[in-house]
Amino acid sequence: MISNERPSGYSPSFKDRSYNSDRPSYQSAPLRPRVEEDTIKTETIQIERKTFILTLKENPRGRFLRITEDVNGRRDNVIIPSTGLEDFSKILTAMAQAGSQPPSQPS
């Protein structure tokens, strides 16, 4: 027997596992219960071909800002806890100011 084929004392070896063809392995874990979220405020902005949806929400764990980027139906999310919104705002303001400055000329 090759060392990596040795059965583990914790679970059956790979060869001994029986798979249920009706249920893929990624579905074997139980689903987490849905957490109720209350929407406090929502704003949408269109920039070129991207749509950004900013939604301030609240759930039992606290408030947070969800920023959703929608590009041709593909969505990506960033979630910022309310405890970080002030710092996020300061950095975003600094980035906006830096972006409005003319590019530096190479010497």
Image (cartoon, helix red, strand yellow):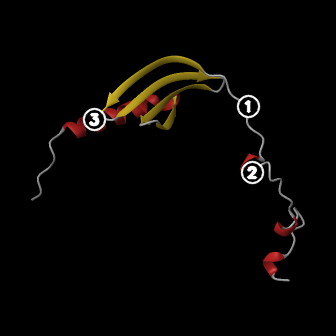
Residue 44 found in image quarter: top left
User: Could you say where residue 56 lies in the image, as x and y percent from the top left?
Assistant: 50, 22
Q: Dot 3: few (<14), some (14–19), or many (≥20) neighbours within 10 Å? A: few
Q: Report the quarter where the N terminus lies.
A: bottom right
* Residue on which disc 1 sits: 33
Q: Dot 1: few (<14), some (14–19), or many (≥20) neighbours within 10 Å? A: few
User: Could you say where residue 62 lies in the image, as x and y percent from the top left?
Assistant: 60, 25
Q: Relative to residue 50, is residue 106 drawn left or right?
A: left
The furthest residue to the front: 22
* Residue on which disc 3 sits: 96
- Is residue 38 placed above or below 74 in the rendered structure? above
| Residue situated in front as seen by the camera: 87 or 52 | 52
Secondary structure, mark 3, is: helix
Q: Amino acid at mark 2?
A: Pro
- Which residue is pictured at 24% across the width and 35% down the height? 97
Q: Relative to residue 97, is residue 56 drawn left or right?
A: right
User: Could you say where residue 57 lies in the image, as x and y percent from the top left?
Assistant: 55, 22
The furthest residue to the top: 40
**Separation (CA) of disc 2 from disc 3:** 46 Å
- Which residue is pictured at 81% across the width and 82% down the height? 2
